[in-house]
Image (spheres, rainbow, N blue to C red):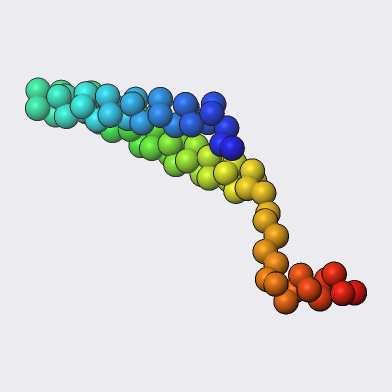
């Protein structure tokens, strides 16, 4: 099972990213270039954190996957005959 805290963090980052993109767009439309540039840097930082968190979620999923044994009937027959 995936770490719910990581998933919650991922969703929070996505929401923050949407807000920052909207703020940057408003700043651009209003001609506030310095604000738009600052917001662009914040967006880049947030995207990097989002990517790292998504990777951590993926790694957590892989670590929590239990290996399963797959035996075909002939393999099982040989195992029990030995």
- Residue at 76% across, 70% down: 76
49 to 74, vertically: above or below: above
Q: Quadrant of the C terminus?
A: bottom right
51 to 26, vertically: above or below: below
**For residue 24, side relative to residue 45 (left or right):** left
- Residue at 64% across, 43% down: 64
Report the front residue among 8 and 76: 76
Instruction: Name the residue furthest right.
Output: 82
Res. 45 visible in picture = no
Q: Position of residue 9 (x, y in %)?
A: 47, 27
Res. 9 visible in picture = yes
- Residue at 85% across, 69% down: 80
Q: Position of residue 41 (x, y in %)?
A: 33, 32
Q: Position of residue 63 (x, y in %)?
A: 64, 46
Q: Quadrant of the N terminus?
A: top right
Report the front residue among 43 and 52: 52
- Residue at 70% across, 60% down: 69
Report the front residue among 70 and 28: 70
Query: What number of labels is visible?
Result: 0
Dividing the picture into quarters, in which one does residue 79 lie?
Answer: bottom right
Dividing the picture into quarters, in which one does residue 15 lie?
Answer: top left
**For residue 29, side relative to residue 13 (left or right):** left
Report the front residue among 79 and 10: 79
**For residue 73, side relative to residue 29 (left or right):** right
Q: Position of residue 7 (x, y in %)?
A: 48, 31
């Amino acid at each position: 099972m995936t770490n719910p805290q990581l998933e919650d963090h991922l969703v929070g980052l996505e929401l923050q990213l949407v807000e920052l993109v909207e703020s940057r767009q408003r700043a651009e439309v209003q001609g506030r270039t310095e604000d738009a540039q600052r917001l662009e840097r914040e967006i880049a930082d947030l995207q990097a954190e989002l990517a790292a968190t998504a990777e951590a979620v993926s790694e957590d999923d892989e670590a929590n996957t239990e290996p399963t044994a797959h035996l075909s009937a002939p393999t099982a027959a040989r195992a029990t005959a030995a």
